[in-house]
Image: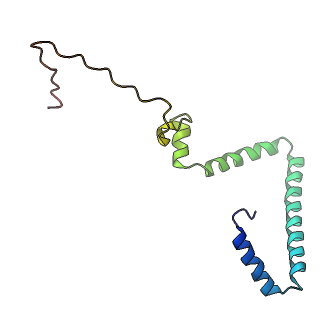
């Protein structure tokens, strides 16, 4: 929940709460906030359990599209290309090649009096 808050931000919030609430009301406010968060979490888990009990196996059928939506939410253009076009092999995009690209076959030298091939479309 507070994964994006570092120690510096936490200390600023603590000092601000100490200034706003004062040292005598701060412990009561912290207690009230933790109790409220615990109660909201219990309500959410109770609602989830109630849905699971009432719907039975259909609950998983409802969760499946939601999990697919969450998977799509995390898709970036690079992830889409890697998954659908490259079958999960991202070595082309990252430049991590396990083996070097194959070299084209060497052309045999021309014999005496032999003319090189001419590509009329290229000239």
Indicate whether 15 appears above or below 110.
below
On the rendered image, what quadrant is the C terminus found in? Answer: top left
Q: Quadrant of residue 20?
A: bottom right
On the rendered image, what quadrant is the N terminus found in? Answer: bottom right
Indicate whether 22 appears above or below 31.
below
Give the colour scheme shown: rainbow
Q: Position of residue 67 (x, y in %)?
A: 70, 47
Q: Position of residue 115 (x, y in %)?
A: 12, 18
Q: Nearer the viewer, residue 46 or 111?
A: 111
Residue at (85, 73) in percent of width and height? 33
Question: For the view shown, which residue lies furthest in the left direction?
Answer: 113
Q: Is residue 105 left or right of residue 112?
A: right
Q: Position of residue 94 (x, y in %)?
A: 49, 42
Residue at (17, 26) in percent of width and height? 119
Q: Position of residue 64 (x, y in %)?
A: 73, 44
Q: Quadrant of residue 5?
A: bottom right
């Amino acid at each position: 929940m507070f994964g994006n808050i570092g120690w510096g931000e936490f200390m600023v919030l603590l000092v601000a709460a100490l200034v706003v609430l004062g040292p005598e009301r701060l412990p009561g406010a912290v207690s009230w906030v933790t109790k409220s968060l615990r109660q909201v979490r219990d309500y959410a888990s109770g609602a989830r359990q109630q849905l699971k009990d009432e719907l039975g196996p259909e609950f998983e059928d409802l969760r499946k599209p939601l999990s697919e939506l969450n998977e799509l939410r995390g898709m970036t253009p690079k992830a889409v290309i890697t998954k659908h076009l490259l079958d999960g092999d991202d070595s082309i995009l990252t430049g991590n090649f396990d083996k070097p690209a194959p070299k084209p076959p060497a052309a045999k030298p021309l014999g005496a009096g032999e003319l090189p091939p001419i590509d009329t479309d290229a000239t």
